[in-house]
């Protein structure tokens, strides 16, 4: 079983049309055209799962760069999606209020910090 990424698809491409393109090179298990949640329109890429890895490799070699609906297809083996979120679970905000301040103060690097006197 091999999962292939198919990019630069015309937005009008249907799953059955894409299946037909790949079935000429081997058995196709599943075709998933990725749709936009808000518009319900194709996002221009899909995933095709082929049963035989050798046939999938032949399909990539034969179809990568080929024309479908006036667009050159970009086909390669799909890689698993990596989790790009930060391990802390934060939403990528960083510093919330005000700037960072003190950015490039190299002259104090490597020195132990002196304890402060209490303010009261």
Image (cartoon, rainbow, N blue to C red):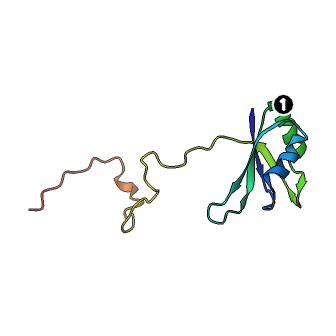
Q: Is residue 81 left or right of residue 114?
A: right
Q: Residue reaching furthest bottom?
A: 98
Which quadrant holds residue 104? bottom left
In this rendering, the answer to whether 98 lies above or below 93 is below
Nearer-the-camera pick, 12 or 43: 12
Q: Position of residue 106 (x, y in %)?
A: 40, 55
Which quadrant holds residue 54? top right
> Which residue is depicted at the point 87% across and 41% down?
23
Q: Is residue 24 left or right of residue 110?
A: right
Q: Is residue 78 left or right of residue 97?
A: right
In this rendering, the answer to whether 27 lies above or below 38 is above
Q: Position of residue 46 (x, y in %)?
A: 74, 50
Q: Position of residue 93 (x, y in %)?
A: 44, 60
Q: Answer few, some or many: residues within 10 Å of disc 1's Cα (few below 14, many 20 plus, some between 14 and 19).
A: few
Q: Is residue 107 left or right of residue 51?
A: left
The residue to which callout 1 is attached is 54
Nearer-the-camera pick, 10 or 16: 16
- Total number of numbered discs in the rendering: 1
Screen quadrant of the N terminus = top right
In this rendering, the answer to whether 104 lies above or below 22 is below
Q: Residue reaching furthest front?
A: 16
Which quadrant holds residue 13? bottom right
> Which residue is depicted at the point 89% across and 38% down?
25
Q: Position of residue 21 (x, y in %)?
A: 88, 47
Screen quadrant of the C terminus = bottom left
Q: Secondary structure at mark 1?
A: helix
> Which residue is depicted at the point 78% across and 43% down?
76
Nearer-the-camera pick, 94 or 48: 48
């Amino acid at each position: 079983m091999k999962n292939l990424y198919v990019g630069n698809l015309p937005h009008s491409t249907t799953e059955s049309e894409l299946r037909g393109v790949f079935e000429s090179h081997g058995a196709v298990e599943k075709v998933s055209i990725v749709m936009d949640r808000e518009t319900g329109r194709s996002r221009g890429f899909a995933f095709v799962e082929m049963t035989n890895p050798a046939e999938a490799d032949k399909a990539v070699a034969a179809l990568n760069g080929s024309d479908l609906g006036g667009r050159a297809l970009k086909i390669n083996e799909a890689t698993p999606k990596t989790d790009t979120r930060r391990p802390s679970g934060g939403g990528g905000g960083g510093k919330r209020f005000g700037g960072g301040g003190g950015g490039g103060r190299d002259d104090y690097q490597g020195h132990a910090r002196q304890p402060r006197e209490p303010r009261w």
